[in-house]
Image (cartoon, helix red, strand yellow):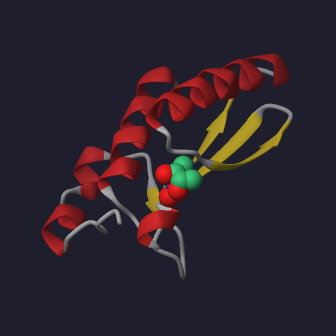
């Protein structure tokens, strides 16, 4: 069982992940990305997919042409965990 983030860990989220927002009504974080075109968006998604697979932690995502929206939550924890923070930070490096 994966542990959810503690209250004090959550207090540091805005500083650690300034581009990510809490999803309303859900213990999850989300970020929207916009690229030049579909090819760039898909290239980004391919890189995130490999990263996610390597971390055994997978995003919920949505793509239309040059837009990609990613939502992260840990199903095994029924909420946000350190795994989400780790993946979000790695995604930020790719973007
Ligand atoms: N991805 N976002 C997310 N949350 C999980 O709990 C999760 C996952 N990918 C794989 C995974 N868990 C495995 O540990 C198994 O539970 C399938």
Q: Nearer the viewer, residue 46 or 32?
A: 46
Residue at x 70% of width, y 40% of height: 68
- Where does residue 14 sit, x and y in percent of width and height? 29, 56
Relative to 37, 11 lies left or right: left
- Where does residue 86 sit, x and y in percent of width and height? 34, 41
Residue at x 66% of width, y 47% of height: 69
- Where does residue 55 sit, x and y in percent of width and height? 45, 35
Answer whether residue 72 is visible to the viewer in this image.
no
Most distant residue in the front direction? 1
Relative to 42, 10 lies left or right: left
Relative to 36, 22 lies left or right: left
Q: Is residue 26 above or below residue 10?
A: below
Q: Quadrant of the N terminus?
A: bottom left
Most distant residue in the left direction? 8
Residue at x 76% of width, y 24% of height: 42
- Where does residue 54 sit, x and y in percent of width and height? 49, 28
Answer whether residue 49 is visible to the viewer in this image.
yes
Q: Nearer the viewer, residue 67 or 77?
A: 77
Q: Nearer the viewer, residue 36 or 24?
A: 24
């Amino acid at each position: 069982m994966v542990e959810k983030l503690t209250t004090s860990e959550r207090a540091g989220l805005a500083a650690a992940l300034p581009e990510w927002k809490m999803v309303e009504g859900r213990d999850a974080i989300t970020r929207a990305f916009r690229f030049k075109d579909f090819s760039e968006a898909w290239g980004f998604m391919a890189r995130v997919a490999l990263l996610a697979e390597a971390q055994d932690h997978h995003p919920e995502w949505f793509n239309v042409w040059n837009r990609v929206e990613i939502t992260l939550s840990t199903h095994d924890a029924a909420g946000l965990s350190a795994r989400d923070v780790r993946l979000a930070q790695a995604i930020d490096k790719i973007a």
